[in-house]
Amino acid sequence: MLEIAKVSKLFNPGTVDEKTALVGANLLMKPGDFITVIGSNGAGKSTLMNIISGVMRPDAGEVRIDGQNISNLTEYQRSQWIGRVFQDPMAGTAPRMSIEENLAIAYARGKKRGFSFGVNKAKREIFKKELARLGIGLENRLGAKVGLLSGGERQALSLLMATFTRPQILLLDEHTAALDPSRAELITTLTETLVKEMNLTTLMVTHNMEQAIRLGNRLIMMDKGRIILDVPEERKKDLTVAQLLGEFEQISGKKLADDRIVLG
């Protein structure tokens, strides 16, 4: 279970560049929840992700996993519980290392590193089996340098690496936004499959409103550092983009020309 309790974050305090990123944010995720997150630019979506993962620490409030306060733990220390996939396909992997070497790093996440960090025959078979689930032939290219993969292939590998050790929390930070439509749909389908098969507790930021409605069992909307809407599964099933836009305009007081302004 992930709990965000009264979390606030202020950048550049006391300067002309002062910016409030989060204001007393509260969020409770139950095991197996798949929550999509939408909001305007500067709404606090990425800051929320960074605070959960440990890239940033909150100015106030706590981040808890299974009741344990992890607010002061480093990103590395949290990696035993948290997996993350970034928007940039180049992030989250080591481009000069091979596919199997990258998977070995993911396999060792949160463990003490010794001789077991290397790749042996048993691990290689595990890697092949897991890669075959992606359905794009990477299991036959274990020695290929990750930097030579296409954006879609690399993002598929990043997704697999993030879920390899069955993390308690999976963070997806606009992980399809940088891909062309066909590759984005491939990664979306892989996401649905892996999250469902592993019953992963997942928080996904997206700029695509249709995707936000289609995926997951809950949807939250952010604006000006606050969570302004939390849509449960029962209501989300029949939600439309037009209704979601209307909700945003009503709650935030912003009149929008189209959904790109909300989620751009």
Image (cartoon, grey):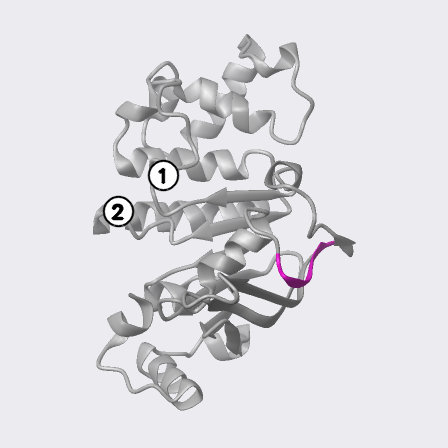
User: Magenta stretch: dominant SS?
Assistant: strand
Where is residue 253? Give x, y as percent.
38, 89
Q: Is residue 58 above or below residue 239?
A: above
Q: Residues within 10 Å of mark 2 (few under 14, many from 20)?
A: some
The magenta stretch spans which residues? 58-66
List the residue tagged with mark 1.
155
Q: Secondary structure at mark 1?
A: helix
Q: Is residue 123 magenta?
A: no
Q: Is residue 129 above or below residue 51?
A: above
Where is residue 41? Give x, y as percent.
35, 67
Where is residue 252? Give x, y as percent.
42, 85
Work out how far the residue at label 2 is from the one at label 1, CA to CA, in angstroms.
Answer: 9 Å
| Quadrant of the snapshot with the C terminus | bottom left
Residue drawn at the location 61% of the way across and 42% of the way down: 167
List the residue tagged with mark 2.
179
Q: Is residue 60 magenta?
A: yes
Q: Residues within 10 Å of mark 1 (few under 14, many from 20)?
A: many
Q: Is residue 202 above or below residue 254?
A: above
Q: Is residue 245 visible?
A: yes
Name the image quarter holding residue 149: top left
Query: Which circle's residue, 2 or 1, is located before the other in the chain?
Result: 1
Q: Is residue 200 visible?
A: no
Left or right relative to 261: residue 108 = right
Kind of residue sitting beneath label 1: Gln
Where is residue 156? Give x, y as percent.
38, 37
Observer-nearest of 45 and 33: 45
Asked whether the residues under the numbered discs 2 and 1 touch, taking CB atoms below 8 Å apart as contact, a structural biologist would say yes
| Mark linked to residue 53 | none
Q: Is residue 72 above or below residue 147?
A: below
